[in-house]
Image (cartoon, helix red, strand yellow):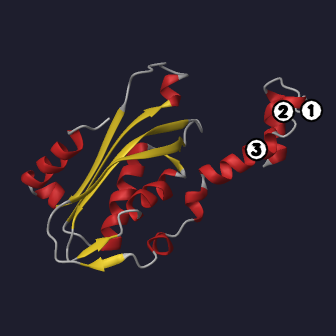
Amino acid sequence: MENLIEEILKQIGEDPNREGLVKTPNRVKKAYDFLTSGYKADINQLVNGAIFEENTTGMVLVRDIEMYSLCEHHLLPFYGRAHVAYIPNKKIIGISKIPRIVDVFARRLQVQERLTDQIAHAIQETLDPLGVGVVIKAKHLCMMMRGVEKQNSELFTSSLLGLFKTDPTTRSEFLDLIRTGSH
């Protein structure tokens, strides 16, 4: 990868031997290794048995999960917040695992629509809850710094499974909870 980054520097008219750029190919490689680490992640290993029997029936919501990803069309960042909720079906998950699941899928080349669905389906497959709701609000640098150059536009996506899709009361509760004080 470092050779390819060096070639990109040359193609854009830079000198890869310039002092400030000498280590750039290695830094970019390390950055991409981190930003695409989700390809190597395993959800079962990440959850690591942190699923617990519990008879609770109330909604579990982790709101305002910071999320950073790379647009697969331009390799530019998009970032925002994910809201993830589920209705337990006799099982709950350690709450720190939910943001980690978000990171697994965000740290891949993505489109926000697919990212939202992947998070919802991973929670569904892991816990078999009565329902899952995921909403992501994000800003896309591919729209902000190039193309239409709209700095204040945001993309909202949702994925609703089970009760979140079929029960209007559950869906309303979820949407009301993520609106309350959300950034």
Numbered mark located on residue 27 in the image: 3
Provide residue 176's location: percent of width, then percent of height. Answer: 16, 43
Provide residue 49's location: percent of width, then percent of height. Answer: 41, 79
Alpha carbon distance from label 2 to label 1? 6 Å
Labels 2 & 1 near each other (Cβ < 8 A):
yes
Q: Camera-side residue: 177 or 8?
A: 177
Q: Is residue 31 left or right of residue 11?
A: left
Image vertical order of residue 45 relative to residue 117, above or below:
below
**Label 3 Cα neighbours within 10 Å, binned few <14 / some 14-19 / many ≥20:** some
Task: Choose top left, top right, bottom left or bottom right for residue 6.
Answer: top right
Image vertical order of residue 119 relative to residue 72, above or below:
below
N-terminal label among 3 and 1: 1
| Local SS, label 1 | loop
* Residue located 43% across and 55% down the image: 102
Alpha carbon distance from label 3 to label 1? 14 Å
| Local SS, label 2 | helix
Provide residue 56's location: percent of width, then percent of height. Answer: 16, 72
* Residue located 7% across and 52% down the image: 169
Labels 3 & 1 near each other (Cβ < 8 A):
no
Numbered mark located on residue 17 in the image: 1
Q: Is residue 24 left or right of residue 102?
A: right
Q: Mark 2 points at which residue?
A: 21
**Label 1 Cα neighbours within 10 Å, binned few <14 / some 14-19 / many ≥20:** few
Q: Camera-side residue: 160 or 63?
A: 63
Quadrant holding the C terminus: top left
Q: Which amino acid does label 1 sit on?
A: Asn
Task: Choose top left, top right, bottom left or bottom right for residue 152.
Answer: top left
Q: Which amino acid does label 3 sit on?
A: Arg
| Local SS, label 3 | helix
Residue lying furthest right in this view? 17
Q: Camera-side residue: 56 or 114?
A: 56
